[in-house]
Amino acid sequence: MSVDYKQIGKQIRKYRKARGLTQEELAGAVDISPTHMSHIETAGTKLSLPVLLDLADSLQVPPGSLIRDDAGPGTDGVLREAMELLASSSEEEMRIMLDVLKTMRFSLRKYQDHGSRENPGPPTA
């Protein structure tokens, strides 16, 4: 099995940006140089396991989510991605996101119910 350092770099960049961090800020948090951080994200260098673990800790994500993109198709991937997003958010952000999700679900269901009454579909014989 080979290690895809390019994919790891993409995942690190994705989570870093989701947390609103610059490369310099994340590099400082894990005690590496900004240049080294840049090289990790662009797969210009291989990162060590301790650095990978420090990055995952600083980004507040499971280390496995930096190694592979688990947010594939299907419900499991969507749930994993949502959980990672929540895990990388403050408590206040999580509460706001939950309120937004509840409101969206209510509106979607209301629209679906309303639409099904207006347009019940093709007549049956």
Image (cartoon, rainbow, N blue to C red):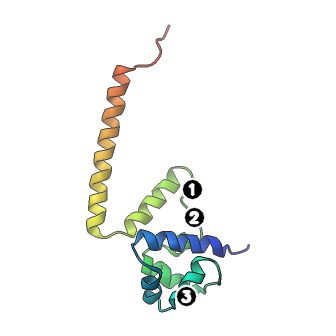
Whole-percent x, y for residue 100 in the image: 29, 52
Residue, disc 1: 72
Q: Element under label 1?
A: loop
Going by the numbered disc 1, the residue's amino acid type is Gly
Picture quarter containing residue 115?
Answer: top left
Circle nearer the viewer, 1 or 3: 3
- For the point 42% across and 62% down, the residue is 83
Residue, disc 2: 69
In the depicted structure, whether residue 44 falls above or below residue 96: below
- For the point 36% across and 32% down, the residue is 112
- Foreground residue among 107 and 70: 107
- For the point 32% across and 45% down, the residue is 104
Q: Element under label 2?
A: loop
Residue, disc 3: 35
Name the disc covering residue 58, or none.
none
Going by the numbered disc 3, the residue's amino acid type is Thr
Cβ–Cβ under 8 Å for marks 1 and 2:
yes
Q: Residues within 10 Å of mark 1 (few under 14, many from 20)?
A: few
Q: Residues within 10 Å of mark 3 (few under 14, many from 20)?
A: few
Whole-percent x, y for residue 9 in the image: 58, 74
The residue at the far right in this view is 1
Going by the numbered disc 2, the residue's amino acid type is Asp
